[in-house]
Image (cartoon, rainbow, N blue to C red):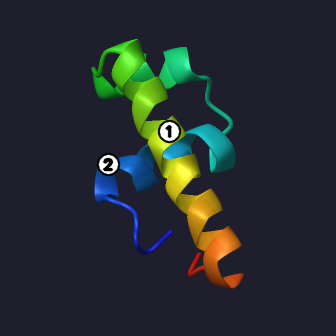
Amino acid sequence: MATLPAEQVELVRQAFFGGLSHSEIAERTGLPLGTVKSRIRLAFTRLRRALEGDGAIDL
């Protein structure tokens, strides 16, 4: 996760380590729901590519 932009890391943390829904994150951050969903989706795409590429990722 160290290679992700800070805004993506924060949203992933809130969603998966904090257990918040996308709607809850949007409400708490003041970001539009679509932005929250897009950033989380982009983060997972980058994480998936990193895992497929070399099998190692910094968490």
Residue 57 percent coordinates (x, y): 61, 79
**Residue 21's disc number:** none
**Residue 7's disc number:** 2
Task: Name the residue at the left extreme.
Answer: 30
Residue 37 percent coordinates (x, y): 48, 26
Q: Nearer the viewer, residue 46 or 27?
A: 46
Q: Residue at x 40, y 49 (%)?
A: 8
- Amino acid beneath label 1: Ile
For the C terminus, the image quarter is bottom right
**Residue 40's disc number:** 1
Q: Say if 50 sits above or below 55 in the image.
A: above
For residue 23, side relative to residue 19 (left or right) = left
Query: How far apart in space, not on screen, are marks 1 and 2 (Cα)?
Result: 9 Å
Q: Are marks 1 and 2 in contact (CB under 8 Å)?
A: no
Residue 44 percent coordinates (x, y): 58, 49
At numbered mark 2, what does the secondary structure look like: helix, strand or loop?
helix
Is the residue marked by circle 1 packed among few (<14), some (14-19), or many (20+) residues within 10 Å?
A: many
Is the residue marked by circle 2 packed among few (<14), some (14-19), or many (20+) residues within 10 Å?
A: few
Q: Quadrant of residue 15?
A: top right
Q: Nearer the viewer, residue 21 or 40?
A: 40
Q: Residue at x 41, y 15 (%)?
A: 33
Residue 20 percent coordinates (x, y): 61, 30
Residue 11 seen in render: yes
